[in-house]
Amino acid sequence: MSRLLVLGAGGHGKVLAEAAEASGRWDAIAMLDDRHSLLNGSLRWPVIGSIDDCSVFSSEWSDAIVAVGHSVTRLRWLEMVESLGFAIPVVVHPSAWVSPSAKIAGGTVIMANATVQADARLGRGCIVNTGASVDHDCRLGAGVHICPGVHLGGEVVIGDGSWLGIGCSVIHCRTIGCEVMVAAGATVIDDIEDGMTVAGVPAREIISRRNKS
Ligand SMILES: CC(=O)SCCNC(=O)CCNC(=O)[C@H](O)C(C)(C)COP(=O)(O)OP(=O)(O)OC[C@H]1O[C@@H](n2cnc3c(N)ncnc32)[C@H](O)[C@@H]1OP(=O)(O)O
């Protein structure tokens, strides 16, 4: 029997669990969250324990996936559940289009109405969120979050841990470094170096609270 544990029962966890459920791939779905005593019974899936309880469930639950927005935590927890013997699936909502030639690493989720085109390569623990598109030959590193409604042209390269805010676009053949933040609604027309936060049309570096601290 194929049974999926979702680590994290926040907003992203709910959306991920619904995508997994809609895919029809699992016989059972449950969640883990440190607020389980508060959350259990309030969601459509049982919240059966805290994150630290994970090892207890490894004999009965075959698969695990991490539903937290913070990419470093997401990748760390994926490593942890894999070391405990869980299989780390790719979750694809049935309304998404994923090219048969795309290659997607475990722990990545493709949400409703998203598109991943021919020969795209997506690393571990990525999120391609609602209605986003990743076009042909794109290369996404580990832990990249493509927010709802983002569009990437063909052959875009994105480094580990980068986060592309809701509704932004990147023209074809551009390279975005690691740990980059692209603001909501921005249009990226140049390559972006590691660690930068950019906003606007065309996207330019901004001093965000993240860079100030
Ligand atoms: C399912 C889901 O919910 S997925 C999540 C979806 N959410 C998002 O995509 C959120 C996207 N977040 C943003 O765009 C944010 O504004 C960030 C991360 C880029 C910047 O946030 P902060 O670090 O808090 O920056 P802060 O608010 O201090 O703004 C810094 C400057 O950039 C400007 N700025 C911030 N965001 C934008 C934007 N999207 N476009 C243009 N300018 C912007 C601000 O006006 C400010 O300018 P000023 O210094 O001239 O006053």
Image: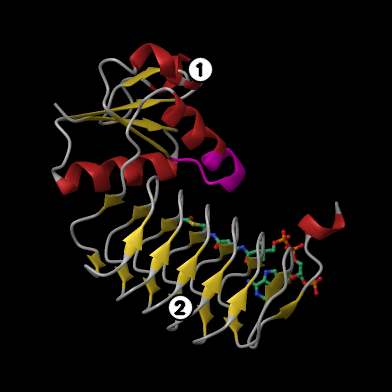
Q: Residue 127, relative to residue 201: is it above or below?
A: above
Q: Residue at x 53, y 46 (%)?
A: 69
In the image, the residue with mark 1 has its CB under 8 Å from the nearest atom of ligand 1: no
- Residue that carries the numbered disc 2 in the rendered image: 152
User: Residue 52, which numbered label?
Assistant: 1
Mark 1, other Cα within 10 Å: few <14 / some 14–19 / many ≥20 = few
Does residue 86 appear to the left or right of 171 in the view shown? left
Q: Residue 23, relative to residue 138: is it above or below?
A: above
Mark 1: amino acid:
Asp
Q: Residue at x 78, y 63 (%)?
A: 208
- Give how far across and how far down residue 163 sits, in percent: 58, 61
Q: Residue at x 50, y 41 (%)?
A: 68
Does residue 71 appear to the left or right of 44 in the view shown? right
Does residue 101 appear to the left or right of 48 in the view shown? left
- Give how far across and how far down residue 72 sits, in percent: 61, 43
Location of residue 129 by image quarter: bottom left
Mark 2, other Cα within 10 Å: few <14 / some 14–19 / many ≥20 = many
Q: Which residues are magenta?
A: 67-75
- Give how far across and how far down residue 145 sits, in percent: 50, 58
Ligand 1 image position (quadrant): bottom right
Tally of numbered tags:
2
Mark 2: amino acid:
Leu
- Give how far across and how far down residue 57 sits, in percent: 34, 16
User: Residue 77, which numbered label?
Assistant: none
Query: Does the stretch in magenta take in 156?
Result: no
Query: SS at mark 2?
Result: strand
Return the disc, 2 or 1, that comes first in the chain's sequence. 1
**Which corner quadrant holds the N terminus?**
top left
In this view, the residue farthest toward the top is 56
Location of residue 158 by image quarter: bottom right
Query: Does the stretch in magenta take in 74?
Result: yes
